[in-house]
Image: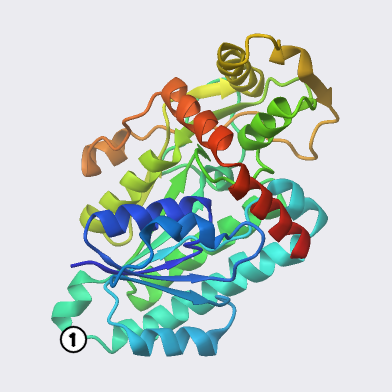
Amino acid sequence: MLNALVTGGAGFIGSHLVKRLIKEGAKVTVLDKLTYCGNMDNLKSIEPNSRFRFIKGDICDSNLLQTIFKDEEFNIIYHLAAESHVDRSISKPADFLATNIDGTYNLLQSSLDYFKSLNDEKKKLFKFIHVSTDEVFGELGETGYFTEKSPYKPNSPYSASKAASDHLARAWNTTYGLPTIITNCSNNYGPNQYPEKLIPLAILNATSGKNIGIYGDGKNVRDWIYVEDHCEGLLRAGLKGKAGYTYLFGGNAEKTNNEVIEVLCQELDSRFPTIEHSKLVRYIEDRKGHDFRYAIDDTETVRQLGLYRSHSFEDGMSKTINWYLDNDAWIKRAIEQRQEY
């Protein structure tokens, strides 16, 4: 049975992964600092459960990490705790360096100390999954794709801090023999994503009659993956992945920001036909260092782990919009939590 430690497990992707692991029969310990983007409501559906434990804490606290590793016999670590919003990284880069670099170092070192204490049989079962982003590879032109061999060229404080953490994970494998795996994913979307990212913010603004802001001319391209598909990939990386390898998870759904908002508006128009939601779109000053295009070639990952995607972009958007329309209380509490934080 998997006995997993999931850092950042109360966040958007982390909470979906925790629920997927619990469904699989795993025992899960969540470590989360509960900043504004970490929300216990995201884990409400699995409590109480004898296979689930929550610890409020910071991965920068090395003493806490040592205590946690003494309490459990983990055979897999999923490291998702991170500062992740590009706009915030531009205004407050120090927060990103502390969590994404120093925090990752602390977790790797604590994991290594624990790994060394295991017998040979248990060492063979242990894995450290470092969950990262395709933004570490920089930007693409109109053609081409990111692969496992793409060079690193981060362009924002966020992506630079994640690139540094990737390098740490790789170094702890090569130098110390810690069985790390790095995963890089494209843009996630889905239920209970904090409304500062494009899709949830656009949904909330549109349904409130507010303007839908799009950076620049809206022609920047992202590959979108439904969060449950990403978590299926992460589960497979934990079960089938090989130490020292990198796996890329993409949605096979390249869209300009204009196209994303067009799909969203059409979906909302079908639900609220008296409103033409596209008229709410406003183009705003472009983000600093805004990468033009990201896109993932996951051929090698699919070959090794199997196809992990089961949602088209349109199906995923429909599910996402339905969730936000049905969860006013979650949205209110999430916003209040950010104000308190």
- Relative height, residue 319 to residue 269 (above, below): below
- Relative height, residue 64 to residue 296 (above, below): below
- Badge 1 marks a residue whose secondary structure is loop
Quadrant in which the N terminus is drawn: bottom left
Quadrant in which the C terminus is drawn: bottom right
Observer-nearest residue: 91 or 147? 91
Residue beneath label 1, please? 119
Mark 1 Cα-neighbour bin, 10 Å: few <14, some 14–19, many ≥20: few
Residue 285 appears anywhere in the view: yes
Residue 206: x percent and y percent? 71, 25
Residue 302: x percent and y percent? 27, 37
Observer-nearest residue: 73 or 275? 275
Q: Residue furthest left?
A: 121
Q: Left or right of 218: which side holds 169?
A: left
Residue 251: x percent and y percent? 42, 31
Q: Residue at x 26, y 50 (%)?
A: 236
Q: Residue at x 52, y 57 (%)?
A: 41
Q: Residue at x 62, y 68 (%)?
A: 99
Q: Left or right of 148: which side holds 310?
A: left
Residue 44: x percent and y percent? 45, 59
Looking at the picture, which amino acid does disc 1 mark?
Asn
Examine the image and state in which quarter residue 279 appears.
top right
Q: Residue furthest right?
A: 285
